[in-house]
Amino acid sequence: MKKILFVITKSEIGGAQKWTKEQIEICSEKFECYLATDKNGWLSRNVIVKKKFLNSLIHKRFSIKYLFNLIRFIKINKIDLIVASSANAGIYSRLVKLLNRKIKIIYVSHGWSSIYNGGTLAFFYTFIEKQLSKISDSILCISKKDYENAEKIIGIKKSKLKCITNSIYPIPTGNKKIKNQKIKLLTVARLTPPKRVDLLIEATKDIDIELHIVGNGILKNELENIKHNNVFFHGEINNFNQFYEYDIFALISDSEGLPLSALEAMSVGLPLILSNVGGCKELIVDNGVLVKNNIQDIKKAIIKVLNNKDFFSKNSKKLFNKKFNLNLNKQDYIRYYLKILNS
């Protein structure tokens, strides 16, 4: 049985961590799975793997100590393939490849931060990404937009690229909230940049709906200072899946790959309001509204969704089952990993 090591910098809950968790679940029947991350957090507690390598030195952009401890773990456990899902994980994995040409490396792009968050150094960071891609066996993009950016902006060779659009297992549904209650708009996000929960709070000030925020982070105090009476902070909820208790889902952000929280909302039929960034456009087909990141645009989108809620809701569920249901395409990942292992 071939052995796959999934490497990700942070074990805290997030989209890339949820993706990694589901990949381990998919792969466990065909492969022996291992995990390398920073600590015993949400991800490491919620997966079953053969062994875990937990070391907080992965947070450093370059640590000789971490690199050689990782190499030792790989050697002892005879790892065949590394699947890296964060910037630092990608750096260390490619360095491992330089020292061990036999091992296979897949780097997963969950949105190219080198493009979206690089600022004045964006050109330099994209140059580094291009060079690192030459060391990789494959670059897996989780949205068509990521694939397009990888080829046209970063300049990664098409032969290195693979696109498998993000998908998830459907979220369990429960009893819908009682009719005639106030409309509940939900956002599930880390309260850190690049998320723009502040815009969502401001946009809902003069609309008679409740805004429910699930997530935690360094911006929480700042956001609490601008909240109004219809804003409710729930903090981080471990394995949150009560999407069915809400009416609308919104995710406002300066950058995204293809957000899993939006897919979770779609799976129970929630209309979507998403920033027009990254792969978000791929999630909207008559089931919600794409917005620019300004208060007026978001406010107009909320009103439009309120006026078309049943229509958008029906289409959200339909689109999810057609394109983003992991039950329908999980074999795509298995075939992809086998192809890389056998190349």
Image: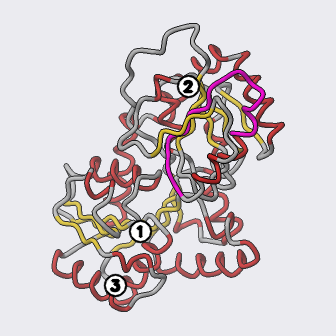
Res 66 label:
3
Side of 19 relative to 306 (left or right):
left
Q: Is residue 165 above or below residue 69?
A: above
- Quadrant for residue 56, please give it: bottom left
Q: Which residues are magenta?
A: 201-217
Q: Position of residue 59 (x, y in %)?
A: 43, 76
Q: Earlier in the sequence, mark 1 or mark 3?
A: 1
Q: Position of residue 323 (x, y in %)?
A: 51, 34
Q: Earlier in the sequence, mark 1 or mark 2?
A: 1
Which element carries disc 1, helix, strand or loop?
loop
Name the amino acid, label 3. Answer: Tyr
Name the amino acid, label 2. Answer: Leu
Depth check: give the residue in front, 281 or 293. 293
Quadrant of the snapshot with the C terminus: bottom left
Residue occupied by mark 2: 270
Side of 19 relative to 322 (left or right):
left
Res 318 label:
none
Residue occupied by mark 1: 9
Q: Is residue 61 above or below residue 42?
A: below
